[in-house]
Amino acid sequence: MMIRSGGAGRLSPFGRMASAIRRTRAGRRWGRVRDLGLWQLSLGFAALGFLTLVPLLVVVSAADAAGGQGFAQWLGDGLGVSARATEEIERLFALPGQAWRTTTAFGLALLTVFGLSFGTMLQSGYEKVWDLPPARWWARWRHVLWLAVLIGFLYLSAISPPWRASPARGFVTVLIGTLFFWWSQRLLLGGRIAWTALLPGAAATMLGLLGLRAFSRLVFSPLIASSAVTYGPFGTVLVIQSWLVGVGVVVFGGALAGRLLHDELPRLGGPRRTGR
């Protein structure tokens, strides 16, 4: 909406300033963020992740007969919350071992099918970031491979590997996470974007997750404890859902930041699109 003053067709000083900003490079960047619909994508990421991916990961982590609290431990570690908040998360996923004993083959297959829809949503977001058309239907095998690698990585993290308390753990986690998001973009985009163009987005995503972890330690950790007292387990669910929204913002926002960086520094990425 343009603000006019005086005669018809004349913009006010504020309107002229807004129009000038839209023509600048920063204004074009903000227009790209607005066109992406980052908030809507993040809400869909959180809702679909909680409904499809979390139940599947609960069942897979329950296969750890030694601990049985693998998913709750991973989730508490991912949020970076205190021991008190982690206890509330473990109460939310109490008796996870029963999930593995009571889940049938049909139920596990159904959870897997629902989990594949999460990969479809992630691919759609990446395609919007890079202005690519949707992939062909026969490329759905990429979602199967991506989901298998994701489950394997989270399962290994959940069963408390020997290097959990090692000083090198943080470096290894950042390195593996960056490689995973780098590979995920390449796989889900069907190789239509060069590896070098995708690296800034993977690095930005991992840095954003580190920042979100620090934010969770300061905000979500006490919020889980207080919400559990006020609302019971439902309060913990609300906080976890809010954290998933933040993860969605970081995942898609990091990919978009990598796209903008690649556009500004083409020498880092070379040709933006490459044929298969």
Image (tube, rainbow, N blue to C red):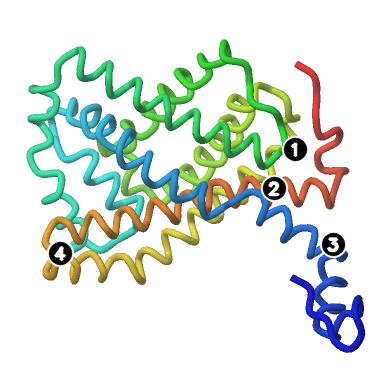
- Residue type pointed to by label 2: Gly
Res. 87 in view: no
Q: Are marks 2 and 1 in contact (CB under 8 Å)?
A: yes
- Residue type pointed to by label 1: Ala
Q: Of callouts 3 and 2, which one flags the residue occurring earlier in the amino acid sequence?
A: 3
Q: Which mark is residue 25?
A: 3
Classed neighbour count for the residue bearing mark 3: other residues with Cα under 10 Å, few (<14), some (14–19), many (≥20)? few
Percent across and percent down for residue 98 are: 7, 30
Give the labeled residue for mark 4.
Answer: 228
- Location of residue 242 (image quadrant): bottom left
Q: Residue furthest bottom?
A: 6
Name the residue nearer the viewer: 224 or 14: 14
Instruction: Label 3: state its secondary structure.
Output: helix
**What residue is at 54 percent from the left and 49 percent from the top?**
206
Percent across and percent down for residue 72 are: 22, 45
- Residue type pointed to by label 3: Arg
Q: Which mark is residue 258?
A: 2
Instruction: Label 2: state its secondary structure.
Output: helix
Q: Are marks 2 and 4 in contact (CB under 8 Å)?
A: no
C-alpha gap between disc 2 and disc 4:
38 Å
C-alpha gap between disc 1 and disc 3:
20 Å
Q: Nearer the viewer, mark 1 or mark 3?
A: 3
Give the labeled residue for mark 1.
Answer: 197
- Location of residue 160 (image quadrant): top left
